[in-house]
Image (spheres, rainbow, N blue to C red):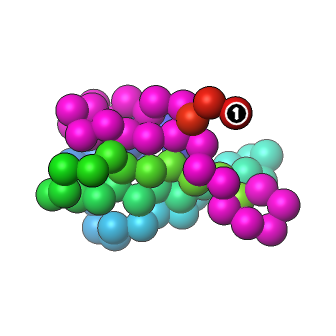
Amino acid sequence: MSEQDRLRRNQRYRVRIQFDTTCRIQKLVPHIREARPGEVHERQGGSWKLIGYIQPENKDSGFITPVQP
């Protein structure tokens, strides 16, 4: 997801799915107003794979901490 998408304070939906030119599909589950990390998933091989977390202290900036493979 673009940095601009992650930085928006007033997102309309709690789950966001975005398509890009390489046909990668990602979704953001921000867990708004909760102390747990937000989650970034990518569609791979017919299922969702967790690719990163947005730690509670980084929710305002949208900084994603990648999940180690």
In the rendered image, residue 58, in percent from the top left (x then y), is placed at 27, 32
Total marks placed: 1
Identify whether 40 is placed above or below 69: below
Q: Could you tell me which quadrant the C terminus lies in? A: top right
Q: Viewed as shown, does residue 24 lie left or right of 5? A: right
Most foreground residue, 59 or 10: 59
Task: Tell me: residue 13, above or below residue 19.
Answer: below
Q: Which region shows up in magenta?
A: 44-66
Task: Please give the name of the residue rendered at 19% of the width and 50% of the height, measured from the top-left corner.
Answer: 35
For this view, does 25 lie left or right of residue 2? right
Can see residue 4? no
Write down the residue under mark 1: 69
In this view, which residue lies farthest toward the left? Answer: 33
**Kind of residue indicated by mark 1:** Pro
Q: Residues within 10 Å of mark 1 (few under 14, many from 20)?
A: few
Left/right placement of residue 51 relative to residue 58 reads: right
Q: Circle 1 sits in a helix, a strand or a loop, which is it? A: loop
Instruction: Give the residue at x 41% y 59%.
Output: 29
Residue 17 placement (x, y as % from top left): 54, 63
Which sits in the foreground, 47 or 2?
Answer: 47
Q: Position of residue 28 (x, y in %)?
A: 46, 55
Inspect this view and state whether residue 32 appears.
Answer: yes
Tell me if residue 61 is in the magenta stretch: yes
Residue that appears at 36% across and 49% down: 38
The picture places residue 11, in percent across and down from the top left corner, at: 28, 59
